[in-house]
Amino acid sequence: MAKEHQYQTTLRWTGNRGEGTTNYRSYDRAHEISAPGKPPILGSSDPGFRGDASRWNPEQLLVASLSACHKLWYLHLCSTNGIVVQNYTDEAEGAMNENKDGSGEFTRVVLHPVVEVSPESDRALAEALHHKAHDMCFIARSVNFSVECKPTIV
């Protein structure tokens, strides 16, 4: 039997300038995402959609979620397979198409993890575990677009 996990967040729109949404330019896209016991995430829309570039946008958060989920599975698999990871960074990229009607969808995300392993670690296994991490990632398994992983092991 599957075990169900529950997640709850609160999003509060903070962009009312006093006029509400009387027109497309009358409001900010600013919001705060929160959950009990965690610092808030300051969000907005992408600057291309009148958002604040200094705040996280949903598209960035989706790409970051895919990157983080992959990393967490990868570190777990390494720890249980004798691979000692000493450093891990990922410069993930996402591509989204905007349609003529204003809708859109992600078409792909590419992860570029650079993983430093200890000299005694099996580099071939370290690379292969990225495939297993991808297969296990909760977020990657939940999206309907391509998530690629192009790892570098050093």
Image (cartoon, rainbow, N blue to C red):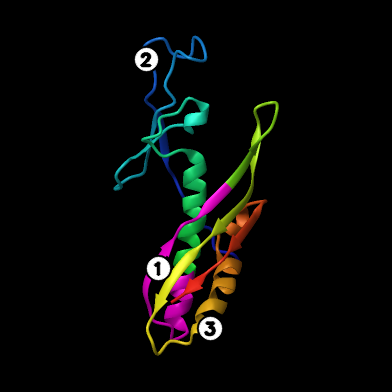
On the image, numbered disc 2 is attached to which residue? 17
- Element on which disc 1 rests: strand
Residue 99, percent from left and from top: 69, 32
Quadrant where the N terminus is found in the figure: bottom right
* Residue ID at (30%, 47%): 38
Amino acid at circle 1 = Tyr
**Which numbered disc flags the more N-terminal residue, 2 or 3?**
2
* Residues at marks 1 and 3, CA–CA distance in whole angstroms: 16 Å
Q: Secondary structure at mark 3?
A: helix
**Mark 1 highlights which residue?**
88
**In this rendering, the label closer to the viewer, 2 or 3:** 3
Circle 3 is placed at which residue position?
125
Q: Which residues are magenta?
A: 74-94
Q: Is residue 7 visible?
A: yes
Amino acid type, residue under disc 3 in the picture: Leu
Q: CA distance from mark 2 to mark 1?
A: 42 Å
